[in-house]
Image (tube, rainbow, N blue to C red):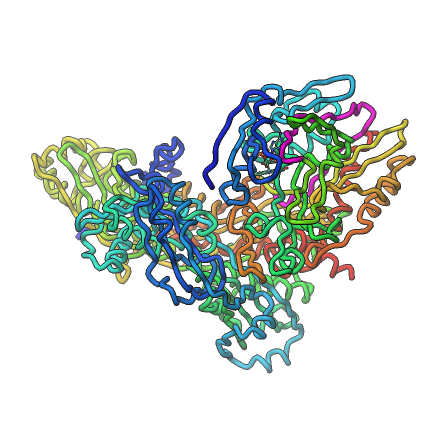
Amino acid sequence: MQAFAYASPTTLKEALALLADRWGVADILAGGTDLLNLLKDHIHTPQRVINIKGIKELGGIRKTDSGLRIGALVTVSELLASPEVRAEYPALIQAAEGIKSVQIRNMGTIGGDLCQRPHCWYFRQGFGLLAMKDGRSLVREGDNRYHAIFGNQGPACFVSASSFGPPLVALNARVKLVSAKGERELPVEKFFVTPQSESEREIALRPDEILTEILVPPAANVRNATYEVRQRETLDWPLVTASVALTMKGTAVASARVVLGHVAPTPWRATEAEKVLAGKGLSAAVIQKAAEAAVTGATPLSRNAYKVQLVRAAVRRALEAARPKA
Amino acid sequence: MPDYSWPAPEKRRVIGRRTNRIDGFVKASGRAKYAYDIKRPGMLYAAVVVCPYAHARIRSIDTSAAEKMKGVAAVHVFDGSAPGTEVLWAGWEIAAVAAETEELARDAARAVKVEYEVLPHFVNEADLSKAKAAGRVKPAGEKVTGDPDQAFKEADVVSEGVYGCPVICHLTWEAHGQVIEWKGDQIEYWPTTQAVSSIGNELAKALGVPPANVHVMQDHMGVGYGSKFSPDRWGIACAKLSKQTGRPVKLFLPRDVEQMIAGNRPSHYARIRLAAKKDGTIIGWESESWSTGGMTGGGAPPIPYVFTNIPNQRLNHTAVQVNAAPQRAWRAPNHPQASYLTCCAMDDLAHKLGMDPLELFKKNADYTARPDVYRWQLDKAAELIGWKKLWHPRGDKTPGPIKRGLGIGVGTWGGAGHLSNCRCNIYPDGTVEVELGSQDLGTGTRTVIAMVAAETLGLPVGAIRVKIGDNRYPFSGTSGGSTTVGGVSSSTRKATMNALEKLFERVAPKLGVKPEELEAVNGQIQVKGDPKKAMAWKAACKLLGTEKISEMGQNDPKNPMGLTTGGVGGVQMADVSVDTETGIIRINRLVVVQDCGLVINPKTAESQCYGAAHLSICAALYEERIMDDITGRMLNPDIEFYKVAGNPDIGEIIVHLDIRPEHDKRGVIGLGEPPVIPGIAAIANAVTNAIGVRVPYVPMTPDRVLAALERRSA
Ligand SMILES: Cc1cc2nc3c(=O)[nH]c(=O)nc-3n(C[C@H](O)[C@H](O)[C@H](O)COP(=O)(O)OP(=O)(O)OC[C@H]3O[C@@H](n4cnc5c(N)ncnc54)[C@H](O)[C@@H]3O)c2cc1C
């Protein structure tokens, strides 16, 4: 890795003062489970690394009237151990359970999870986020078995790697982003973006901002679940995931959010599936129809059409998991 | 000369007992030191610069910036990488930098400026027509036996299929590398190797120094799978950096470079046709196979495998050249692939005949070298997996997305002992040492040596000091071809018997008998069959005064004297479940039935089978070197997308060692490789049995499984 200056501030204010207003100058270090790989592989070559783990206010899970406040530094293990999360947000627990490595669970934070870089193998080998070479898309023309089947009309064909992105979008969560100039809140759905040029990023975070917390609305009446299709039981990336959040009215779905992971440069709302579910009971036929609707508009690349079928399976299984037990 | 033969089964006290590894504790506690752990005073760390292109010509190498960096001690340009050199694969070693720290070395390696003229490359051989179009094929010619045309004309049934397994990497958990300290004319060498006794000689030759001046040391090593016999270019570079700087140097390959250049197993693809009679008797074989092992192409797989005597064969093979580092021996070279190709073709034939594949395999067992062994093993495996109850014709008809199936694979291997010398020292205080220039790759070699010595000397296993891993001990062969256990057990048996004979000579007069009337049991030397007429081991050794007994024993592969032999068979059966909605395969059980002669330590022998089964599961479901057509690079030189099975992925592995008396009396036979052969075939056939359609290529990843299912419904 390239040599860098290192700071370990203990307050948010100090940390913010160390950030720069353009990418590439400073990198935030949380658990480091992704950042260290990026540094070692020279994908990131910052001048400064700012360790935020010493900032107390970025930790902790708190239940408030407006829902759950999850500090950016909360680790996957802490999330798994939280009774508040367990009580209302199985979709988050199931996503966390999918991260099979104890070491990653203990070190990896939820903020880092949302901000981690894509794992596209061309990107990680130094061909850039959009993986263009001599005007050719390496992904489109090369090996795209793990790449996007939705939202891939532009130059970006990688998939968002975040395990928590899909359930948080489904649960309609928001993130708080703070800079020295002020703070703002964004729905998680808007936090993930599809870059159109090599200079853009896949998240709406600005280079001078820190993601400080995640706010998840109450979900007492929201049946929610995540289903991940992983080839291996051991540490592995999901091939496709589906998170669903169903606001119930009696036994019927009043409104639904169905969000797919590992299929697009962002977590992907399957709005056609949501429409199928709205106002209906969760019969096997409805679930089947929703699963089928979820693949509407898929544009697989040369080697990843199999993911279309995985979407059907994941949506069906997530809905079955969310369905109230008879 | 003493009678070296193994004690009769009923007389064995140590051999044949489940025995814990004598180095289990140091390994479990982290005290075992591997080459990577060696830290010498003043040691420098080296990093390598490799070529990022699959095919290029080196225009220039500028090391000046790296040399000027603070903390950099030396930069070495690899022999065979001078400007003008044509680089034939990505990962080709260009230069190595030695620096005060690992980090500095890596930074300096990046500062080495290499200019290339990039040349066209070809990296994927799976599609033979593309390889032909690229001019990368070398047909190996046709081999015909009998009259295949006539056989196919006479056949009641002809089946045909295409099958393939890709190149996989060795992925040795301990990376390739070494520490070398070149002081004056002496070279201290800590490699990670399968060849303690010979690797130093090879290094010496490359460096032009006397072999006697190279001292090789290796206490423990973290597997080689056939890729760690030679010092390699990085070993030579490490030595030269040490000479250049006058300091010890540590050079290990990083995982990505390791994956690219430190070993791979060739691919094998084949279109196979089988001709058979209605009753299942195979009467003809035709195959067109192709494979790659890098730029040299790939050799023909040994097919038809096991059923070698199938009559009327026509074999065609094409070697394909790709711009990738050369293949290396991989645990039973070419056998797992050949087993996969043959057993899948036979399974498809059984289906076409409407026959249970178990019956087809048994029916044709006369084409194997050991029909009775295979028939017995097929029945045993069938019994263990519950074939009668669970097998069904292709396509599990139970409702729901999860389909279950069973499948068969077979294997064969040699495994006779290599040339091995052992010295046994008995000291006046009763201490026993056995010294061999051998190595324990993690297989349990140390423990086996201790057990043989303990058995022979009538002592507990813990009383034996096993000294291996040093080329100053008597020469012992490399650990390849499953030859180690046969070699070291036989040489240890002889050395310890020879030493014991010397001890008997001292004891005999004291007990008033002839030396040949004595035996060593239960920690004492006694008159045969009479424990009362005895002398305790320590008292006996005391008779040596100030002398020590030091006796040699040798396993001569040309005359193994019945202690070791070769030739084993194995049958494996897999029980899998396939999720037909996701294409994900789970292993329920893998039954391993294996003969391997006389088993010294059943526990570590079974461990070999577990480990081998694990690797078969990796290859059947996950492992694949993925090469990028455009960039010519390996896309998964890591353990993130180069996937291997974790413990939750392997299901239950059931091992049955076939140790019937007729095998026991053949002597010791190696087991390192045989159990890694039949698994892929067994799993592939089980998947086919479950879902009713063949997934033609391994690894059987969800995309391939779903594509096969789609073809079935189409
Ligand atoms: C073996 C392995 C397996 C993995 N498996 C999974 C998996 O199954 N699912 C999954 O989603 N991920 C997985 N990851 C990726 C990653 O490690 C985790 O997502 C982890 O939670 C990231 O958190 P971290 O705190 O370690 O992030 P870091 O590595 O510290 O940071 C990651 C990125 O986010 C930025 N960042 C971190 N925190 C903030 C913040 N508060 N504000 C602004 N920017 C910030 C950093 O600058 C950096 O760019 C895996 C990683 C590895 C190495």
Please say if B161 is above or below A53: below
Please say if B572 is above or below B550: below
Relative side of A61 to B61, left or right: right
Residue B411 image point, x, y percent:
49, 58
Residue located at (29% from left, 36% from top): B461
Residue A217 image point, x, y percent:
78, 25
From which residue to which does the magenta span run? A206-232
Please say if B684 is above or below B130: above
Q: Is residue B661 visible?
A: no
- Residue B75 within the segment the image draws in magenta: no
Relative side of B253 to B213, left or right: right
- Residue A215 within the segment the image draws in magenta: yes
Place residue A220 in its image quadrant: top right
The residue lying toward the viewer, choosing from B96 and B661, is B96
Residue located at (74% from left, 40% from top): A242
Residue B298 image point, x, y percent:
48, 67
Relative side of B615 to B275, left or right: left
Q: Is residue A106 visible?
A: yes
- Quadrant, the C terminus of chain A: top right
The residue lying toward the viewer, choosing from B331 and B391, is B331
Quadrant of the rendered image holding ligand 1: top right
Residue B324 image point, x, y percent:
48, 62
Residue located at (54% from left, 53% from top): B679
